[in-house]
Image (spheres, rainbow, N blue to C red):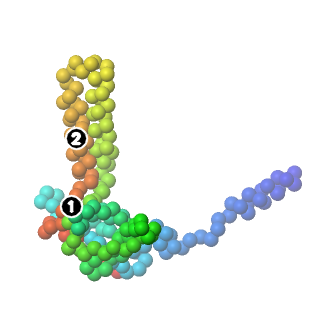
Amino acid sequence: MFWVFGLVALTDSVAQPRDTLTTEQLLERRGGSFAARLRPSRYLALDVNPTLGGFRRYRFFEGDEIRFKARGQKFRETLYEVTDSTFVVLMANEVMNRDEPVAFRLGEVQKIYVDRRIPFITAAGRLLPIAGGVYLLSSVVNNNFRAQSVLPVAGGMAVAGVIFNRLSSPRMRINNNHRLKVLRTY
């Protein structure tokens, strides 16, 4: 009987949470755009004004991953710091075995790669080419490729997958309609 009371007392003391985090600590832990809500900071803004559709702004805060093309190379790095006319990313230096900051001017950036999550379209962009290949392969194995209607269906699935993938992962060339600028939170 005493062991039951001891077990209840033991689980009661273990089940109590440790210190509760404040709202500021939770936002700081999440990083990126959440940390920018705590203190004034700068961020990169890509303003897109396409010929079809409406205005859209993509925001890149410190700590966010940014994919871009500059100086003839593609980069996929974490945004480390944003100043008035430049931004800094940390790049791995394999010789020194550490991360080193590399600054880019806004004028050096040629393209920005953006990931948009469009329901069903993003998933279909990855699955339709695979489904078209499996459909073509199964027709070859089962029917020795006698059905003439297999190629248009498999090809249509693959082409639709490529189109959907381009819709959900656009490449924005920096020009008059796609402007990269530095903005500030208050």
Q: Identify the residue at horizontal 44%, vertical 70% (top origin).
A: 96
Q: Position of residue 6 (x, y in %)?
A: 82, 57
Number of dots carrying numbers: 2
Which corner quadrant of the image does residue 82 belong to?
Answer: bottom left
Q: Please report whichever mark, 2 or 1, sits nearer to the chain's N-terminal start.
A: 2
| Element under disc 2 | helix
Q: Residues within 10 Å of mark 1 (few under 14, many from 20)?
A: some
For residue 111, the mark is none
**Circle 1 is placed at which residue position?**
172
Q: Residues within 10 Å of mark 2 (few under 14, many from 20)?
A: some
Q: Position of residue 41 (x, y in %)?
A: 36, 79
Q: Position of residue 53 (x, y in %)?
A: 16, 58
Task: Point out the image quarter for the C terminus.
Answer: bottom left
| Element under disc 1 | strand
**Amino acid at dot 1:** Met
Q: Nearer the viewer, residue 5 or 122?
A: 122
Q: Is residue 66 left or right of residue 11?
A: left
For the residues labelled 2 and 1, say whether their Cβ atoms are less than 8 Å apart.
no
**Amino acid at dot 2:** Ala
Q: Identify the residue at horizontal 38%, vertical 70% (top origin).
A: 90
Which corner quadrant of the image does residue 32 belong to?
Answer: bottom left
Q: Is residue 139 above or below residue 12?
A: above
**Circle 2 is placed at which residue position?**
160
Which residue reaches farthest front?
95
Q: Identify the residue at horizontal 71%, vertical 61% (top origin).
A: 14
Q: Is residue 49 left or right of residue 78?
A: left
Q: Note whether residue 62 is visible.
A: no
Q: Identify the residue at horizontal 19%, vertical 70% (top origin).
A: 179
